[in-house]
Amino acid sequence: MSVLDNLPTIKEQLDAVPQQPGVYLWKDAQGKVLYVGKAKQLRSRMRQYVNLQDERMMIPRLMEQVASFEYLVTGSEHESLVLEKNLINQYAPPFNVDFRDDKSYPFIALTKGDVFPAIKYTREKPVPTTRYFGPYTDARAARIVIDVARRVVPICQASCVEWKRLRRRLEADPSLALAGEKPCFDSHVGLGPGPCTGACSPEEYAKQVRSIERFLSGHRRAFIEEIEREMHQAAADLDFERAARSKTRLETIRSLQDRQHVQIPPALSADVIGFYREETITGVHVLTVREGIVIISNEFVLDKGFDVPDGDLIDGFLVRYYEQATDVPREVVLEQVSEDAATIEEWRTSKLASKHGARVRLTVPQRGDRLELLELAQRNARHTLMRYKVRTRYDEERINSALLQLESALALDKPPLRIECFDISTIHGCHSVASMVVFTAGAPEKAQYRRFKVRLDTGEANDFAMISEVLGRRYAPQRMADERFGACPDLLIVDGGKPQLTAALQQLAALGLDIPVAGLAKADEELFVPWSDTGPIVLPSGSEALYLVKQIRDEAHRFAITFHRELRGKAMTASVLDDVTGLGPKRKKLALKAFGSFKKLCEADVEAIAAVQGIPQDVAAEIFAVLHQDNL
């Protein structure tokens, strides 16, 4: 059912929707939630969908499936953001941005509800009496952090058998005396303070817990100063064993700092988030910087679904990530912010709950250390995506799906394993060229690329005639028999609409060839085929087939433009230098060879030109005058 069929009914229903903040849910005929969104003014925002005034490419396809809607009014934009997040988690709508890997991520946790809290690695659902640090996308990194943290601040581990036994006994009798109990292995090697033997009171242990909380939160400057004071005091008291332990803890912390090769201002505490986006998938890398040190480096993969704007993609990630993240920075560094940035800042500020009224800021750096860190995060986001694609064989699956989709959409006899695409580049019929790019099994085969100088001289841009000429040359019998041009394509794409398609069909018919042909219009990526009487074929937005077709079209355009510019440059060079008196072909060659390019020749002065062996002073002066008469 199309939105056009439901348009009057939906418009009537929208009249009753209030102009208040809230969340809306678009549903299909079966009642399945297709999309969840938030709005400052519900009625106005929802009318943009129905009137197709929203410029996002996914909207027409979404509205084709919409049969009904629901809405929920909230008291503020902040409340609508939280409600939208919860509803997306509940319904997992297909048109909303989501994590590709919808899994639980590991955290480091402190069981603060116990008399002697312990540290542990966990994926459990949050428990109110436990404090969590993370998330960590690398489980190994999380376990290493626990190991380092316990060397810096001795604390019990939740997996310790003696700690579990102590916990059960204290739950049964909180006043239990602990002296003389069996010590655990960790207390022997200095990783635990020994509460199981009574060597550490709850008050002393609580100091250890506060220290490890500061360490895991990244607030290490004051923590280091405290250890240094302890070390100096122990040395002054001639307690050299305790001073040595403090020194070892300091060396452990400083070794972590030494591993960091990026220079960061010591006062900087922020989350730096880089995105690397391809047509159907996005890599994200988060650098958690605290007091000038990267304490966590996390990576994610997003499935953006359909062609949502970058701002929506970023907002979707921020909401999902900071729903889980336990440590709230006062600054988040991004490549761009959306119109909902203020709402997200308010939501994050409420989670920060600063006693001093500090706010969370989303910033877009233009220069300096923050920009360098952002570029580092973006480079790592690219590698995140590349690793994911290799690990999951994503490209192979996407290409197979794209070829099958093209076979179905274009009614081909078989998947188009070899696709040839042609593009014309011209300026009012001058220096006209054509490019032919070849994709085999969905991948570019550059050895098969060809480019053509159009011989037709019409004095005007005539794509119809140019396509006919180029296809006539490419698919002439001698070319088809030439192994250098490869096999006959399974699909031929010409860049353009119906006129280009008609020209291609007529030329192929004249050659007696039966090759499936489609014309690709630039504006809306519509495919014109000869057998369709109902208009062009529109591939689904965000589909693998559309991504492949656009990739082929863009490659053909790039290849044609490059050749066209090359011919224009050569023509301009030849025509200008032909006006120089006394400059024949031999001297022209000497001048261009001496300077390496026409551009550098234009930048040279008379003396530099005259210094070229074989070019007299008067000819050099004439070259300089001609080149600068039109400020070339």
Image (cartoon, rainbow, N blue to C red):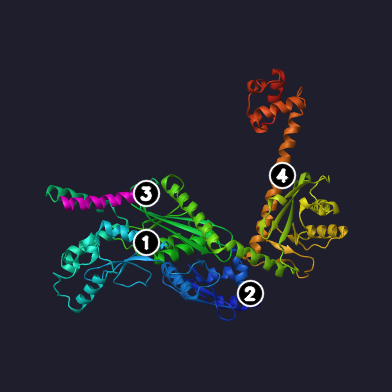
Q: From the image, tell me which residue sits under label 4.
A: 563
Residue 323 visible, this angle: yes
Q: From the image, tell me which residue sits under label 1.
A: 142
Labels 4, 2: front one: 4
Q: Position of residue 492 (x, y in %)?
A: 76, 59
Distance CA(mark 2)–CA(mark 1): 49 Å
Relative vertical location of residue 93 with respect to residue 30 in this rendering, above or below? above
Q: Tell me whether circle 2 and circle 3 mark residues in contact (CB < 8 Å).
A: no
* Three-letter code, disc 4: Phe
Q: Quadrant of the N terminus?
A: bottom right
Neighbour class for label 2 at 10 Å: few (<14), some, many (≥20)? Answer: many
* Three-letter code, disc 2: Val
The secondary structure type at the circle numbered 3 is loop
Magenta stretch: give its range: 240-260
Residue 496 visible, this angle: no
The secondary structure type at the circle numbered 1 is helix
Q: From the image, tell me which residue sits under label 3.
A: 259
Labels 4, 3: front one: 3
Identity of the residue furthest to the left in this view: 237
Q: Residue at x 45, y 47 (%)?
A: 372
Q: Position of residue 41 (x, y in %)?
A: 49, 69
Q: Which mark is residue 3?
A: 2
Neighbour class for label 4 at 10 Å: few (<14), some, many (≥20)? Answer: many
Work out whether residue 328 or residue 101 is closer to the camera in this orientation and state it.
101
Q: Tell me whether circle 1 and circle 3 mark residues in contact (CB < 8 Å).
A: no
Distance CA(mark 1)–CA(mark 3): 17 Å
Sequence-wise first label, 1 or 4: 1
* Three-letter code, disc 3: Arg
Labels 2, 1: front one: 1
* Three-letter code, disc 1: Ala
Say whether residue 6 is magenta.
Answer: no
Identity of the residue furthest to the bottom in this view: 30
